[in-house]
Structures are given as C-alpha cells and as structure tokens.
Amino acid sequence: MRTSEYEKHDGLSLAKLLHTRQVSPLELMDCAISLAEDRGQAVNALCNQDYVLGRKLAAEAELKGTFGALPFLLKDSGLASTQLASDVGSRLFAGLKAKVDSTLNTRFVADGFLSFARTTVPEFCMAPTTEAVQNGGPSLNPWDRTRSPGGSSGGAAAAVALGIVPIAHGSDGGGSIRIPSSCCGVFGLKASRGLVPHGPARGEGWGGLAVDGVLSRTVRDTAAALDGIAGMELGQPYAAPERPDSYLEFIDGEFDRPLKIAKWTRAWNNIEVAPECLDAVAAAERHLAALGHEVEEAPLPQLKYDAFVDAIIDVMAASVAMTVNGYLRLVGPKDLPALLEPAILDAYRLGGAMHAETYALAINRFHSVARLMEMYLGDYDVILTPTLTQPPARLGELSMSDDFRSFRKKAGRYTTFLAIVNASGQPAANVPLYWTEDSLPIGVQLVGRFGAEATLLRLSAELEGIAPWCDRRPSLT
C-alpha cells in the first residue's frame, strides 16, 4: 500500500482491509513510519520513536480486537508502557521506562493498536500549547506553522491531522484533547469521569480532572475505540457510568425526538470570544437546526470563574510537587532549576508550600461545579459552546517562562469553556465544523450529561454527515 492510499482511510476502514487480508500489518506500519519521518518531523509531533519496535510488532502481529494491527501513537503523558519510554515533556523524566503496562495500554493492545512512538506534549502536560524544551523546540500547527497545534495532546492532534495515524491516544485534564482537536481540525472526545481506567498504578489524575481517550479523524473511529477501552477496572475510585452495548452501533441510530441544546456565546468575566469562534458556533447552530434539533441562546451557570481557575492552579501545583518529590525519592537529588521550565519549577514550589486546607477547598470547588453543571443540564440535553475563545495560539503566546499562576490564568482565558467539564466529570467533544478564510480550523464543543457519551457521539456523527470534515487536510508544501 502506498502512503497516498493509506492516508485516505480511517481506522475502521484500514482494519477492514487487515481483517480481509487485503493488506498486511507491516505494510500499514511502513506507511505510518514513512509519514512520521516526513510530516511528523516537519511539525515536531513525535518523540521517543522506536521504528524498529514498530516494524517488529507489525511483522509478528496476529490480528486482534476491532482494529486488527493498526499503527498507533501513545501520548507522552506518562501512560505506562513497558515498550515505549516517556519524558512527560520534561528533561527531568527523560527516557523514563515503566515496569508494568497501564490498564489502558493493555486495552489498546488487546483492541489491535500497535504503538511505535509517543506524541509531543508540554512539560507535565500543563499547557494549552506544546512547546516543551525537552522536545527541542515547539510543535507546530500543520495548518499554520506560526501557530501551536494546541496542548497538551498537541503532537497527537497534529499527527492525526497529517494522516500519520488515523487514531491516536490523548488525555484531557483541562481541555487537552479538545484544545488540540480544535486547533488541528480533528474530532476529540473527553469521556465521563470513571469511564476509561487510570490504573493500576493510580486511580485518578489531578483530583479527578484528568481523563484518557483518543483523537481521530472520524466519529466512528472514536466510538469504536471507546468500545474497546471503556469500563471499570478493579478498585478504581470512581464508578463508570452505564453505557450502550456498542457506541459504534449506537451512532448509526436516530434520536426519538429533537434534542434541546443550550448555546453559549458569552464567557464568564466578560472574557473576549473572537468573532471566528462565534462564527463557528453559528455554523454549528445552522447544521443542528437543519438536523431538526432545537438550539437556543442560554444564560451561563452562575460560576465564580476566578475562584475556579485558582482551584485548578492549586491542584496542578500540588500534583507537580507530588510527582517530582516521588521521583526524587527514587533517584536522589536533581538540579531542578536546570531540569524544569520556569512555570513548572514555580508550580513545584507552590505545591510544596501549600496548606492542606487549600487543596481540600479546591477539590470542594470541583465538586460544586459538578452539581452546578448537572442541574443546569436538567433543562437541556446538550450544551453548544466555542471550544476555545480564540483561534489557535501563535507560538510563544502562552509561555512557560511566566510564573505558574500567571501562566495558568492566561490559559484560563483561552480555554474558558473547557476545564469546567473536567471538574464536573461530564463528557464533551470538539467537533471540527468550521475553517476560517485563512484555512484555520475552529472547533465547537458539545457537552453532555454525565455518562451521555452515546448522545454526543450520535449527534457528532449526524453533524459529520451533514458537514463532513474528514477529507480536509493540511498541506505542508
């Protein structure tokens, strides 16, 4: 198979070719590696590549699960893999290798994914851009290389947009699947808390904010991947919500009534929302109305947004202190000012000096947001928002050279509609419905009730049917 043919297929289409023996796993891996060496390098999307491993896995692969033996990329988020090292975007953790596979990675393998590299992230995955020093320079947006692909799953979104793989692993603790999906014009779903496992080494991330998942070019690929990875693991701290027998089968059905959808076009604290982002929401509203759904302008929930952003900062800082100190206990003292970027070094200091009461208050704020959002959705099926308040950020616009609190407050003005859904534990998706005249993708976000992934996936599939985006590809010429 030639790369020009490979990149036309989504994951399920390639899997069908594998299962019907029309193509071999090694042929697909060779295509993925060729594109990784060319396009991936051009935008600095990959790290910890092991192409020898990738070809070995493909040559020895037995078809399994839904996807058979499909080339795949793991985010450099520290998701434990005994085969691929992870830096978590940090010089401190460079080349860290796990001794035990994570539950999620085991499920990826069982469903037929063959991981041959990691995708780039900002240090500790704590930025809405991907500009880690450890990566040797910023990762670039394939649609406009003066801009960021987003973060923290920036490398993953760029890789999927460029056709290196049709599906890639991502994670989302404050928008980190939805931000880069919006910036790169791909589909990205943040699942409900508890649906996708974190173990066995840990039960949650960032006080329950973080969720793992995938980014893909088609809705059906995400639905199929979720079928393979969703479900509780023994001893996890949060119960998984109920789900259909198959998300993939569910998205082919029809709703029994029009959905009632709340539209947000204003942000808390009068944070500015760019005209392009409002244009994307308007386009989504037209498509939803054409599908028969009811969209109405709705007031924002009464959220104290500044206090909420402070809570995120506190929990992230505490997480940095816990992670760094845990590592230092294993390996001994390190020159942290030389190994951590300024904002993360400041977060380490903030976390180390934090009072227990401050952390407990932050968790309580998250829980209050969960109650607020679930009550709000008592009147609606779905919320429609801009994914970001601005088009993809220009390189250097959100810099880790700031102190951590200032840096994260800037991030909070860019990602205003996103982290609240991490706090509430609800599902949300970026849907790539709109491009500017300059060919910049601008996404919209759909938010559902807790456990309503099936509704979001079916609605996203309806939108994909009426306004398809899969064939829109960036050009690196």
Image (cartoon, rainbow, N blue to C red):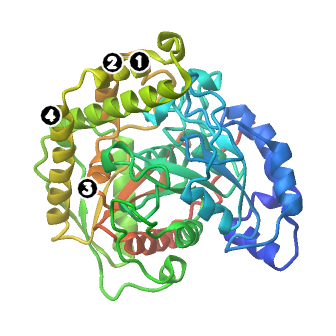
- Circle 3: element type: helix
Label 1 vs label 4, nearer the camera = 4
Instruction: Using the numbered discs, state the Cα–Cα distance from disc 1 to disc 3 in whole angstroms.
Output: 28 Å
Against 337, is 105 above or below? below
Looking at the image, do the residues carrying marks 2 and 4 touch, with CB atoms under 8 Å apart?
A: no
Task: Name the secondary structure under disc 1.
Answer: helix
Above or below 261: residue 116: above
Q: How far apart, in angstroms, are the residues tagged by discs 1 and 2?
A: 6 Å
Q: Position of residue 53 (x, y in %)?
A: 82, 47
Q: Earlier in the sequence, mark 3 or mark 4?
A: 4
Residue 122 is situated, as x and y percent measured from the top left of the image, at 51, 31
Mark 4 surroundings: few (<14), some (14-19) or many (≥20) residues within 10 A: few
Q: Residues within 10 Å of mark 1 (few under 14, many from 20)?
A: many
CA distance for labels 2 and 4:
17 Å
Q: Cβ–Cβ below 8 Å for labels 1 and 4? A: no
Residue placed under numbered mark 3 in the picture: 424
Depicted 89 relative to depicted 182: above or below: above
The label on residue 349 is 2
Residue 30 in sight here: no
Q: Quadrant of the N terminus?
A: bottom right
- Residue 175: x %, y % from top left: 40, 46
Residue 191: tell me if it is visible: yes
Pointer 1 residue: 345
Out of 276 and 235, give the one closest to the viewer: 235
Disc 1 and disc 2 in contact, CB within 8 angstroms: yes
State the residue position of label 4: 357
The amino acid type, in three-letter code, at marker 2 is: Arg
